[in-house]
Amino acid sequence: MAIHTAATVHVRTCTCFYSGGCDIGAIHVYARFSSGGWRFQKVWKPTDLKSNAISISATDFELMWFICTLLIRCTLLCVHTQAGAIIAEGKEGGDGETMEGEEGGGWDVDDDIELPPDLEIEDQGGMAGGEGYFVPPAKGTSPATTWTNNSQLPADHVLAGSFDTAMRLLQDQLGAVNFEPYKSLFMCSFSQGRVTSLGIPLLPPLYGHPARNWKDAGVRNGLPAVALTLAILVQRLQGGYQATTMGKFQDAVVKFRNILLSLTLIVVDTKSEIAEANQLLSICREYILGLSMEIYRKEQPKDTMEQTKRVCEMAAYFTHCDLQPVHLILTLRTALNLFYKLKNYKTAASFARRLLELGPKAEIASQTRKVLQACDKNAVDTHKLQYDEHNPFSVCGASYKPVYRGKAQETCPLCKTVYLPEFKGTLCKVCEVAEVGRDAIGLRISALQFR
């Protein structure tokens, strides 16, 4: 058997060239020494190399002998492996014949299948037996499916286009039952979940799915990039403030409600951002409730004393909404004027003091002090109203009546608006999405809230 192997070994004192094609077990060494000249030696063992007076150092000799021997052994290993495979293949065929007669003769796999003539596959590309028939690979998992599998946040499901699962999550987490206000928000978020690039003419465009965890997303761990952020919603809040200051209450309610619902479709990463989002939700709730009550109050008639008293009560409730100081001044001025005209001077004086504590403009402060002076001269309330400023209360989002602390009440699972017990199961008037009194786990906008 001829073994064709060659290697060049560089040592400190000589260069050794080994060539196969010789007797197995012998090493042919063709060496050039530092003194000059080439020598060809047939070596069977290390002593042969020394006995032929090849003068090299002990270290170089051991290194040369080790490398040459290693090459021989690797070559023999390859030969033995190929021979073993041939022998094993022959034994396998013999074992198969032996097992045929035994009980439980292996797998019942029959490759002799007769196909009907109409399924005969013609040779394609010179390949017979149907080898030219193309079998497409199994379809992989889309990025959108990966997003829905990796996240329990409604925002990620909306970005993936899985509106059904997004609505189910909103129902479980926030008690949402009316998704009509979400329609435009869903479509806007979905359009921001992927990028499009034009390809070859007459072919559809190519879609890309950007991931917010692109550094370690891989194939199965991706999460969608979110375009709508908490900072954007905080900027939108200024638009609601401006509309409120200008007296455009309807527009302000629309803006605040849009921010409130958009809060459920964002993703944040830190606990401080979660707290900021909850604070923003509370601000929107207070403004929607207060402005809606003010719109309702202005629509009420004042023909009778009971109607007038009811109008004054709602004006007083509005002053207990958590508003910005500039807006709270406006509500206190309105309540002060109504109660002074109603001759409830004691309560009017209370509104005047609260107004002065906020530091209004000089002319407003001067006028307020005059009214306060007049009220203090006759500090009585002519009419009894359903209003107790010293007893903490929340305003019912449906009836606009006080719900005093400690009394039975129901809340909206989304915006946390308080309702009287008789409004349980109804649609929240503030967010217009959730069911009052429905059990829900609460707002979920971060993976931290699931740990």
Image (tube, rainbow, N blue to C red):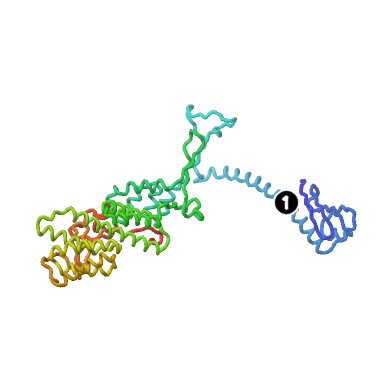
Q: Nearer the viewer, residue 378 or 183?
A: 378
Q: Is residue 94 left or right of residue 196?
A: right
For image coordinates 90% across by 58% down, the residue present is: 35
Mark 1 nearby-residue class (10 Å; few <14, some 14–19, many ≥20): few
Q: Pinpoint residue 369: horizontal percent, then vertical percent.
A: 22, 69
Q: Pinpoint residue 289: horizontal percent, then vertical percent.
A: 25, 58
Compared to 224, does 442 lie above or below? below
For image coordinates 28% across by 58% down, the residue present is: 287
Q: Is residue 167 left or right of residue 378?
A: right
Compared to 426, does 91 lie above or below? above
For image coordinates 50% across by 38% down, the residue present is: 199
SS at badge 1? helix
Q: Pinpoint residue 327: horizontal percent, then vertical percent.
A: 28, 61
| Residue 257 seen in this snapshot | yes
- Badge 1 amino acid: Leu
Quarter of the figure with the C terminus: bottom left
Farthest-out residue, left: 304
| Residue 110 seen in this snapshot | no
Residue holding disc 1: 76
Q: Pinpoint residue 329: horizontal percent, then vertical percent.
A: 26, 63
